[in-house]
Every structure is written in C-alpha cells, then in structure tokens.
Amino acid sequence: MALRLFNTLRRQVEEFIPFDAEDKNVGMYCCGPTVYDYGHIGNFRTFVFADLVRRYLAFKGFTVNHVMNITDVEDKIIRRIAESGTPLAEFTGRYTDAFLEDLDILKCLRPHQLPRATNFIPQIIDLIVRLEKRGIAYRTSDGSVYFGIAAYRTCGCQYGQLVQLDPDAQRQTERISGDEYDKENASDFALWKARVSQDGSVFWESPWGQGRPGWHIECSAMSMALLGPSFDLHLGGEDLAFPHHEDEIAQSEGSGLQQCGRPFVKHWLHASHLLVEGKKMSKSLGNYYTVRDLVTQGFSGREIRFLLLRAHYRETFNFTLEGLEGARVALNRIDVLLGRLTELTESIPAAPTDSVSKLPIKVAEALDDDLNVSRAWASVFDWVRDTNVALATGRFQPTDAARELAGWHLIETALGLGRKLDQPTPPEILERVKARTAAKLAHDFVKADLIREELRSLGWTVEDTKTGAKPKRL
Ligand code: AMP
Ligand code: ZN
C-alpha cells in the first residue's frame, strides 16, 4: 500500500511520492534545536515524530537522507552568552552534546547530517547576495539586509503558501529584525543583521559589513546546500509553519535556483504541540520537563518515547506524569509478552516456517494512513491480547513464537522502542553510586546510607556485587 501523508502546503492528505520515485531516494530536512538550553519533551515530540517518519520511510523501502540543523547562532543564544560570558562555541557545543545524548536516550536514530549554522556562513552570504541581485533583498542604512516581500510578489511568487495570510493585516512597509514574530506582523524580515554592541564577539565579515545571519536564512542555506534546491520532505513543529517555514520558502524560491516548475519542498509535515494543562509546553511558560528531569524521576527513554508516539502527530496531546505511568504499564505488557515468546523459542529450537505474523501488515496499514499511530497501537495491543490467549491454551509452538517475534522485530524497526534491557543507566544515578562507593571507602557510612536513600527516592537501589556496586531499578 502507498504511504499517504498530510501535506501542509495543500492542506490535504496525499500520496507521498518523492522526486526520485524510481530509485526511492528521499531528502528529508527537519528543523533542529536552537541550542541555548536543554530541549524539553515538547521539542522532542517533534524530533521523535521526525524519527518515526524516517524509520517508516526506511521500512517502506526508501533510502532516506535525514538532515537536521543545529541553530547555533540566534537572538536567544546571543542573549544567553552575553549573560553568562561563555564563548559562543563552548556554550552551543555544551547544549548540542546534551541534545544528541537526549536523542540517544529517546532511541532516535542520529540524523545522517547535523549541519551547524556557523559552519555555513559562506553559503548563507551567497544566498543573500543572490537575493539582493534579484532585487528581492535590500540593505538598510545600518548595514543590515532585509527580505522584501513586495518585490518577491512582483516576481510572481506567493508569500503565504503554508498559512493563509490576510493581506490587509500585513504591514509590508514595516520591518522585523527579531527572529520570531507573529502572523499579524508579516513584514519584511532580516536576512543579515548588522553588528550591534550586544552581539559582543559574535559577528562575521560580509559584503554588507560585520554582522550575523537571521534565523530563517540559515535553514534555507543549509537545506539547499545539503539536499539541493528542491527536496522531498520538510518537517517541524506547527509553530514553525509561520513565519519560519514561510520565510524559508520565500528565500529559497526567491533565489530562483529550482528547476522550472519545481517547488523548494514537495511535502511539508508539521507536528502539533505537546501541551501541559491545555497550554503549549514551552520555556517561556515554565511548564516544561526536560528528558533529564524525567529520567531522574526514574522513567526510561523508551517510556517517554512510547508516550510521545501514542497520539497522532496532528493532534495536540496533553502531557501528564500519570500518562507516563500509563505508558510504563502498557509497555510492560508488550515486554512481558516478548519475554514469554523469547523463552519459548529458546526452550526448543524452532523449526523454520513459511507462515508470517499478521502484526506488521496491520501496523503498516495504519501507518500508511497518515501515520495513524493510534490505530497502529490498537493493532499491537490486539496482538498482545490474542497472543497471550494463544499461549495460555498451551498449543502455541516454538515456531509460532518465532514467527510472532519476527513480526514484532520487523515493525519494531519503524517504532524504534528497542529492548527493555537496552536502557542505559542515567548519568546522575551513576554519579550517586560512585559517590556512595567513595563514601563507603572513606568509612563515611552515614553519607553512604543517605545516598542510598536518595537513590531509592529516585526509583533506584544499589546491589553490592563482587565486581562493585551496581545500580538497579526498583
Ligand atoms: P526550538 O529549539 O525552539 O527551535 O524548537 C525545536 C522544535 O521543537 C521545533 O520544531 C518546534 O516547533 C518544536 N516545539 C517547540 N515546542 C513544542 C511543543 N510544545 N510541542 C511540540 N513541538 C514543539
Ligand atoms: Zn528551520
């Protein structure tokens, strides 16, 4: 069956056909994190969703080139480094590493390419020069460069492809220098920002003098440099559709680099927000959890991933700790069954069989339908129930168990939950176990006991073995 996805560009579900339909190569770009802090699990809802898309495309036989940028120069970053006095590369390097660790914890495959904006300054400048030559970008007296929406439209291009803009509400004579702004302010936006004193040492030389790129141009330059001027899939959270993605389209199509009739991006996918008590999970509202917060509370990356994948990507989804507890219970049902099936196949060598599990077929049918995960999980839990019933009859043979396990492993490549045993121990827990061992060696047993209690409150215990102290989940 063909894969059908909702395309924000046309506001409808349509068959996904890449430009290279014959060889099934897919270029996929997902806007990555702005590395000024740890990501929260709202951000990771979008990244786990991107991982599902990539894995499912691979399951369907596509060869995916998955690019995710790291925004390592932007207004918020500049403000933070000014406050902390840390050099740009050191500051953003710290949060880039943390982001990649979190991706690993959540069992997301690392994108094939992770371009950092600061490594693409020449490409960004070239693109702005090109827009300027085409009369779509213009300089201002302070040495900044702006994108001119009116000039872009005069070239026959459409500004307002992803969102319907009310032309009367647009004040095109005004300019926006901030990287983020509201729809009401659909105005000319900054491509290059002239150096100001608050930028400190964050600036580059350019044909317009010293300055730094705007956020939107970074993604146009990096995506086109790595995937070509037209590519198949572009993803991000719903808040990015406007202005970020609309501006990306304008800058990229304004460059005129695409072959006649080809768009910058064929298929746009946007993930809805993760909410907390009905409000978007965000740093500014302070209602957020990082992956680390939840791991420290004893939840595993698998459980968080499972929860983030439970709701359809176009539905907003309310996060609660009870929901996460529920995810743990549900995942445990799968794990118990997998354990029983594995035991059975290990008890007697299974004879080869031609029969195949129905599970991957059912799950694939659901995912083909605009990644309908709710239906996919319903099939998984029907399978868990039916297989448990079959096991209880005692007539289930090792060959049957092997067939069902193979079915699970096949679909598992798309869902990416991994095995329970694969869970790494969180670094905070390892640190505490080390500290307890040190306290014991120093005969400070009061401290050692306090650490043990602290570990217990985090859902862990310590076992003293011949090879040293080992953390264990309670
Ligand atoms: P940022 O690091 O703020 O640039 O955001 C990284 C990604 O997370 C973007 O694709 C955002 O759209 C997405 N995002 C931000 N907040 C949420 C949320 N509450 N739920 C889902 N995705 C989000
Ligand atoms: Zn972007």
Image (cartoon, helix red, strand yellow):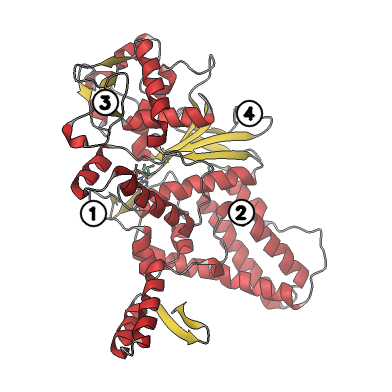
Find residue 427 and report its image quarter.
bottom left
Using the image, determine if residue 36 lies above or below residue 418.
Answer: above
Can you tell which of label 3 and label 2 is closer to the viewer?
Answer: 3
Asked if residue 317 can be seen in this view, the reply is no
Find residue 413 and name its label. Answer: 2
Distance CA(mark 2)–CA(mark 1): 35 Å
Dot 2: what SS? helix
Distance CA(mark 3)–CA(mark 4): 41 Å
Find residue 286 and name its label. Answer: 1
Would residue 355 be found to the left or right of residue 253 on screen? right
Which amino acid, by three-letter code, is at mark 2?
Thr
Disc nearer the start of the sequence (2/1): 1
Ligand 1 within 8 angstroms of badge 1 C-beta: no
Can you tell which of label 3 and label 1 is closer to the viewer?
Answer: 3
Dot 4: what SS? loop
Disc nearer the start of the sequence (4/2): 4
Query: Which residue has dot 3 on it?
Result: 210
Ligand 1 within 8 angstroms of badge 2 C-beta: no
The residue nearer to you, when weighing 427 against 245, is 427
Disc nearer the start of the sequence (3/2): 3
Structural crowding at the residue carrying mark 3, measured as other residues with C-alpha within 10 Å and reported as few (<14), some (14–19) or many (≥20): some
Which amino acid, by three-letter code, is at mark 3?
Gln
- Rendering quadrant holding ligand 2: top left
Can you tell which of label 3 and label 4 is closer to the viewer?
Answer: 3
Distance CA(mark 3)–CA(mark 2): 48 Å
Disc nearer the start of the sequence (3/1): 3
Which amino acid, by three-letter code, is at mark 4?
Asp
Find residue 88 and report its image quarter.
top left
Question: Which residue is pictured at 36% across the width and 36% down the height?
Answer: 240
Disc nearer the start of the sequence (4/1): 4
Using the image, determine if residue 359 lies above or below residue 314.
Answer: below
The residue nearer to you, when weighing 119 against 150, is 119
